[in-house]
Image: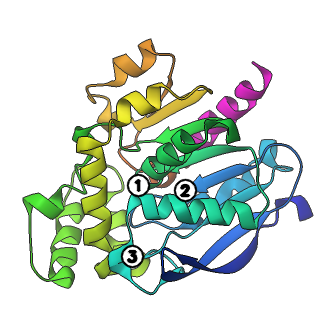
Amino acid sequence: MTANKLETFTLPLTIAGTAVEISGMFRDGTGVPLVFLHGFGSTKEDYADVIQQEELADRPILAYDAPGCGATTCSDLDAISVPFLVSVALEVLRFKNIGRFHLVGHSMGGLTALLLADQDPSRVASFIDIEGNVAPEDCFLSRQIISHPHPDPEDFFRDFQDRVWQSRYYSSSLYAASLPHKVRAGAVRPIFESMVDLSDNGNLMDRFLALPFPRMYMYGVQNNTLSYLDRLAEKGVELAEISRCGHFPMYSNAPEMWQRLIAFVQGSETA
C-alpha cells in the first residue's frame, strides 16, 4: 500500500557551527504526525515497523538518525550533546513542516524528547517516553563513562560493548553486537557525559511531570523496580510495563510495544 511506504531523505544542516547531514525516513499522510527519536547506539530503523501497524497506516511519520549514529554524519563528534540533539530535532521538524506532533523517544531519544517538549509544550500532542532519562538512576549505561574510564575512545567503546554483551537483560547481546555498526566511538563520551549531567542536575523529573499533555512512561518488566514509577502514576503519567523485556522493547517485545503505543496515541486524541 502506498500509504505504508516510508521514503528516505537526507538533510544537510549546520548546528552551532557544526556540519551534519541527517539521514531520515518520512511518510506524508493525514492526522497528527508521529515523531520518533531513537536511543543511543540505535537508529531510525528501530521504528521502521510502523508501516506494519494498520491503525497508523495514514499517519505522517518522521524518524531520523541522530548525529554520530546510523547514516547521519557529523563534522565534529565532540560537539554532540543532548541540547545539540534538541537543536537538530527542531531543524528537522522545520524542514518537514511539522507543527504539532505525537512524540516518541527511547532512552537518549526520550531525554532529547523531554527537553524538546519542555521547550515548547504547545507543539506536542502526547509523549511516549520509552525508558528515557528522568532521574540519576537511569544512567546505568551512560554512567559507565565515569565508572569505567578509559583515555582511548575506541578502547572504552570495545570494553563497553563487552560489558553490555554479558548483561542478563533481554536483548543486551543483540544490542551490543550491533553497536560498532550504529554509532561512532568518538560520539560516545560527549553523549554519555551530557546524559549523566542532565540526569544528575537537569531537574528532569519535575520537568517531565509538569508537561501539560498526555504522557506515557514505557519500561521493560526487568526494570519494574525503578524507584519513581509510583510517583509517575500518582501524577497522572500512564505506565506501560512491557513483558519479556528489559531496556529495548523494540527488540525484545515489539508487538506489545506497538500495541501499547497505538492505544495511547488513539486514546490521547479521543480524551
Can you say which quadrant of the picture contains the C terminus? top right
Residue 109 position, x and y percent, is: 47, 54
Alpha-carbon distance for marks 3 and 1? 13 Å
Residue holding disc 1: 108
Give the main secondary structure, helix, strand or loop, of the magenta stretch: helix
Q: Which of the 4 image quadrants contains residue 9?
A: bottom right
The answer to which quarter of the image holds residue 3 is bottom right
Q: Residue at x 21, y 84 (%)?
A: 154
Question: Residue 183 in the image: x percent, y percent?
Answer: 39, 76
Q: Which of the labelled discs sits on residue 1, or is there none?
A: none
Please name the residue that numbered disc 2 is placed on.
37
Quadrant housing the N terminus: bottom right
Name the element at disc 2: strand
Please report contact status of discs 2 and 1: CB closer than 8 Å, yes or no.
yes
Mark 3 → mark 2, Cα distance in angstroms: 15 Å
The single residue placed furthest to the top in the displayed view is 234
Q: CA distance from mark 2 to mark 1?
A: 8 Å
Q: Is label 3 in contact with label 1 (beta carbons under 8 Å)?
A: no
Q: Residue furthest bottom?
A: 75
Label 3 packing within 10 angstroms: few (<14), some (14-19), many (20+) = many
- 263 in magenta: yes
Q: Amino acid at mark 3?
A: Val
Q: Which residue range is magenta in the image? A: 255-271
Decide which of tag 3 and tag 2 comes sooner along the chain.
Answer: 2
Q: Which residue is mark 3?
A: 183
Q: Is residue 1 visible?
A: no
Do the residues under discs 3 and 2 have CB atoms within 8 angstroms? no
